[in-house]
Each structure stands twice: as C-alpha cells, then as structure tokens.
Amino acid sequence: MTGESGQRTAVAVLGLGEMGSALANAFAGGGHPTTVWNRTPGKANSAVGNGAREAATAREAVAASELVVVSVQSNAVAHDILESAAEVIAGRTVLNLTDGTSSEARAVADRVTENNAEYLHGQIMTIAPGVGQPESMLFYGGSEPAYQRYHSALTLLGGRGRYVSGDVGVPALYGMAVHDTMWGILNGFLHATALLSDAGIEAKQFLADAGPAVANLTAFLPFLGEEIDSGEYATPFGALKHHLPSLEDLVRECESRGIDAEFPRYTRSLVADAVEGGHAGDSYSRLVEHFGKG
Ligand SMILES: NC(=O)c1ccc[n+]([C@@H]2O[C@H](COP(=O)([O-])OP(=O)(O)OC[C@H]3O[C@@H](n4cnc5c(N)ncnc54)[C@H](OP(=O)(O)O)[C@@H]3O)[C@@H](O)[C@H]2O)c1
C-alpha cells in the first residue's frame, strides 16, 4: 500500500532465519521502508543490502513500522517477541507468518489484539526461495480490512495470496490440509514405485505409460468434496465393495514379494470395516467418517 504521502508502508520484519530473510528482501526490494531485527545479530546483511535498516531491538523495529511481519521458529517465540514490543504495538498491524497449530495462532492473535493492534495470520505454501514468485501461494486469515489495506505489499510475497477467513486459525488448517493431501499422494506414489522397481520397472517408464491415469485421480476430488459436504455417499463412480478385491491383490502382491504391506493393509482395513458396516454400495468418500466427520 502507498499512503497519502506517496510513501510505501513501513514494514518491520522480526526474525531473519531462512524465511524471514526472504520476506525482508521481498519488502525492501519492493521499495518498502523495511526495518529488520533478529535475536542473533549478524543475519541482516542480505536485507540491508536490499535497502533495509537493522534495529537493535524488536521494540525499535516495531516502533518504526506500520506493518509488523513475524517469521520465527514457533508461535511461542513470536508471542514473546511481540510481548517485548507490547508498549509500542497499538495501532499497528501484525502479520504473523510463523507455522504452528490453529490454536497457537489464535493465542498470539488474542494477545496482539488485547494490545490494540490488528492481526493477520499467514500460511506460506512455498519454501524461502519461492517468496515473491508469481505462482507462490499464501493463505491469510484475521482482519479483512487489514488484508485489504496491505494487499499490494502482500503481493510482493507471492502472486497467489488468498484471504480465507476471519478466523486466524484457518490459514494453518488450510496449510495442513494441503500437506495432508500431499503426503497421502506422495506415499501412495512412492509405495507404487517400490513395487514396480522390485519388478525392474523404472518410475519414469511407468509415468510415461500410465501418467494420465495417475494425473486424473485429482479430478475426482471435487466429486468427493460434494459428497462429504452433503453427507450423501451414493456414487456413480465405483462403490467401496469394488475396491476390496484390488486391495486384496495389492496386499498379496506386496507380501509375496517382500514389499512393505503396512500401507495397503491399512487401506484395506478401512474399506473392509466400511463394507462390513453396511456401506458396500457407497462411494469412497464414506471413509471420511472413519477419520472423524460424524
Ligand atoms: N524456510 C522455509 O523454506 C520455510 C517454508 C515455509 C514456512 N516456513 C516457516 O517460517 C518460519 C521461520 O522458518 P525459518 O526457515 O526461517 O527458520 P530458521 O531459519 O530456523 O530461523 C528461525 C528464526 O527464529 C528465531 N528464533 C528461534 N528461537 C528464538 C527465540 N527464542 N527468540 C527469538 N528468536 C528466535 C531465529 O533467531 P536466531 O537467528 O537468533 O536463532 C531465526 O530468526 C517457521 O514457522 C517455518 O516453519 C519456513
């Protein structure tokens, strides 16, 4: 954002680890007056090279800035740093980009708003070198007016920023949901390639031959999502009972060839329990109830 004076928003970046340094470089490189602070001195060279100024204390950095960005090891650390600047934080906006649980984010937010500052929590969905790239995604939650006010400054962090909720815990939940989905897909792929590799087939050969079948899998997610949201698990796409024989084959194939079978056995037990529970004709989405959706 640019104020009436034409000056860009003054930004403080607290924490100059791998991520904090990338954030400081993005703001300073984007023309924002940027003041940086790190517990251990000597980490500001890159930001200072981009035009940032180093403060001796977090309090000094906060006092010099309108938007206070925090990126440190944990939300407990973020809380303590912001407490050390509590006397000067009123009227400013804190953007906490520190990873943690949703309740940890809410705890920091409560303390900041008690001190009469606005609060945004952000979840960065890229590694440090991805900061500022057009395709990099960030989720934001908390004060929507603050998000709108600083929107152009936040665009410097990644081209695909998205405000998702007034609840400051939701960005962390979105991040976890993306990672949860990712790990499920990655584990499935790595297990599958171990099975193929044991038979002398390289992953790249498999992808060249079967890539479209694998890539199409995510096309089913919107259908599953609709069923989950509505609690209607009837399906035109293949009932749970049809998964069981394929899972049995996979488990037997792994066991007979000494490939780790724990992962397919776990999936088989989920499906078998649902089938035995009277849901043989339902969609795979029915398994969401096993994971906790009542
Ligand atoms: N690096 C990435 O690619 C990446 C990607 C996505 C998200 N993130 C998230 O970004 C946040 C920062 O990660 P990072 O990679 O920058 O971590 P990092 O390189 O390990 O840096 C940690 C930062 O926390 C500070 N810190 C730790 N304990 C402190 C304390 N007790 N008091 C004050 N400062 C303390 C460190 O200060 P000192 O220098 O004094 O130790 C340093 O500035 C984390 O939540 C991380 O999950 C990082």
Image (spheres, rainbow, N blue to C red):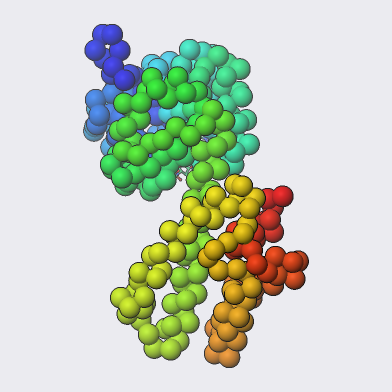
Image check: 97 left or right of 267? left
Position of residue 280 measured from the top left corner of the image (x, y, whole percent): 68, 69
- Viewer-proximal residue among 167 and 66: 167
**Quarter of the image that includes the N terminus:** top left
The residue most toward the front is: 236
Position of residue 162 measured from the top left corner of the image (x, y, whole percent): 41, 35
Image check: 240 left or right of 22? right
Task: Look at the image and tell me whether residue 239 can be seen.
Answer: yes
Answer with the quarter of the image where residue 3 lies: top left
Position of residue 163 measured from the top left corner of the image (x, y, whole percent): 44, 32
Quick check: 25 above or below 292? above
Quick check: 200 above or below 142? below
Give the residue drawn at x 59%, y 47%: 229
The residue most toward the top is: 5
Quick check: 72 above or below 289? above
- Viewer-proximal residue among 10 and 172: 172
